[in-house]
Amino acid sequence: MKKTLTISAAAIAAAIALAGCSAGSGSGSSESMPGMNHGSSGMPSSSAPATSAAASAEFNDADTMFAQMMIPHHAQAVAMSDIMLKKEGIPAPVTELATKIKAAQGPEIEQMTGWLQSWGQPTETPSDMPAGHSMSGMMGEEDMAKLEAAQGTEAAKLFLTQMIAHHEGAVMMAKTETTDGKNAEAVQLSKQIVSTQETEIQEMKDLLATL
């Protein structure tokens, strides 16, 4: 299975477009506060909001890298799921899985985009990514083209094989954030991603064995 760090401009644009309409809203009103109060800690009208905002605004480079990398990674998973949901003759369990992945990862894109905006950080993945950081499990253009062209059971098998590799990459990235991250909400999301996607990996392996 080919893996690449190449992120299509379309995938990034889709991620930002998805998040742009409601950036920050997926995380509740507390998420919007850090961006509003950033650099003006003396302005809040009460100590409670100031304390909450300060806690939410605490982040480090690992948090930033996690969000910047996971946004396009999630965007590709949503795109792969969309491809499957448009096909005819796909086994129901595979369609249900694609629906579940899209439903979970779309809001997480919004959440992570909101964090980056509130932290004053770029929402795009940096071109000069630090050594040791990679978006493992990403599909290349040829991989996506094969998924587009495949039909029926062949498409289901290809989707499951590709998504297993994709999820394994996301789990690796999330575990790094769990270890190195500082922002409590980002670390919590990373743990949630590990738990959810490890469960889905096993589910996909079981499904693949039945096709």
Image (spheres, rainbow, N blue to C red):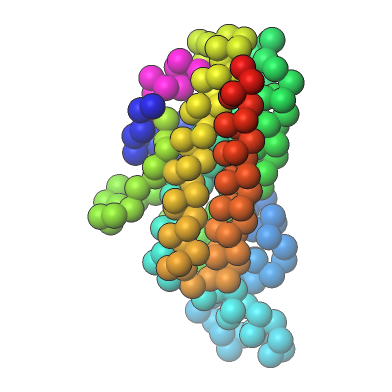
Q: Residue at x 56, y 85 (%)?
A: 41
Would residue 201 be seen by someone viewing this image from the given angle?
yes
Would residue 20 be seen by someone viewing this image from the given angle?
no
208 to 191, vertically: above or below: above
Q: Is residue 152 left or right of residue 179?
A: right
Residue 2 locus on image (x, y percent): 35, 28
Residue 135 locus on image (x, y percent): 39, 44
Name the foreground residue: 90 vs 7: 90
Dominant secondary structure of the residues highlighted in magenta in the image = helix
Q: Residue at x 39, y 66 (%)?
A: 61
Name the foreground residue: 135 vs 158: 158
Q: Residue at x 69, y 56 (%)?
A: 25
Q: Is residue 141 magenta?
A: yes
141 to 64, vertically: above or below: above
Residue 142 locus on image (x, y percent): 38, 19
* Quarter holding residue 206: top right
Residue segment shown in magenta? 140-147
